[in-house]
Image: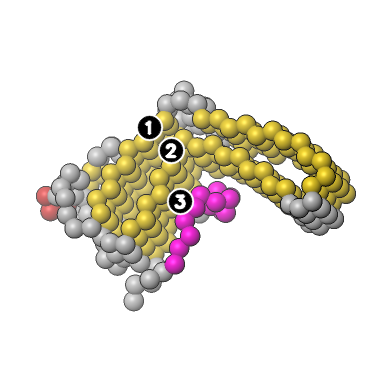
Amino acid sequence: MKSRIKTFSLKTLLAATAIAALPFSPAFAGGQYGTWNDGSSWSGGAGQTNSQSGSGSQIINGQVNLNTNWSNLNGSFDTVGGDLVGQGAAAGNMIDITTMNNTRVQNNQIVGPQSNIGSNINMDANNVWGGVGISNQVLCNGASVSTDPTLTAVRSNQECHATDPYSSIKTNITNIAGDAVIQGSSLGNSFEADSNAPNFPIMSKQLNNSGVVSNVQANMFNVGGSVGLSSSAIGNTSQIIHYNTN
């Protein structure tokens, strides 16, 4: 059995994997594994529907976010004996699915046009004996599926209509003995799936209709270690891993 660590980490948000838009095979597009409708329903092949029970896991997830999700983190620190870490996050809809059997997943996540999703970090640090790490992550829709069965079938629809998934970091860092690392990221839709199932059909639709913004403003002086800065704004990202089943 494979080992896994599933999180919506900075690596997930910063390392976007592009998936080419290829035609679906007949078996997936309307045969053995069912048909796609409008993202809110699907019907299975051979007369099966998503309402029918069967062996394994039948997972139907519907998430709709219509309001504001906002996080503010403000801090000022002087003379710290160890490390200093600040973390901010804001998200509209998220789901993490882990199973050990045959699994069929229908995922539908929508963030409405009146939603504001954002996170602000304003943080100053002076005289820190260790290192300083500041990270800020903003996500409109996130879905992760990880399974160990014979069959995994996933249909995922993600729509981000938010005004602006927005990430902002403003920091002044002086007199640091260790490293200083600042990472900001903003993302519309994120989908991840991994499985060692011999049968692993996936249909994923991602629509981003929002402005995705990430701002990092950092002033640093007298840093004893290394300095790292990163900022990313990504509309849609998918990562699919199919382990060797031989």
Amino acid tagged 2 = Asn
**Main secondary-structure element of the magenta-colored stretch:** loop
Q: Which of the 4 quarters of the picture holds residue 111?
A: top left
What residue is shown with label 2?
93
Q: Viewer-nearest of labels 2 and 3?
A: 2
| Towards the viewer: 148 or 212 | 148
Q: 10 Å neighbourhood of mark 2: few (<14), some, or many (≥20)? A: many
Disc 2 + disc 3, Cβ < 8 Å = no
Which dot marks residue 64? 1
Where disc 1 sits, the SS reads strand
Q: Is residue 8 left or right of residue 72?
A: left
> At 26% across and 60% down in the image, what residue appears?
102
Q: Earlier in the sequence, mark 2 or mark 3?
A: 2
Depicted 102 relative to depicted 128: above or below = below
Residue 141 inside the magenta-drawn segment: no
| Towards the viewer: 142 or 161 | 142
Amino acid tagged 1 = Val
Q: Position of residue 133 (x, y in %)?
A: 70, 49
Q: Position of residue 136 (x, y in %)?
A: 62, 42
What residue is shown with label 3?
238
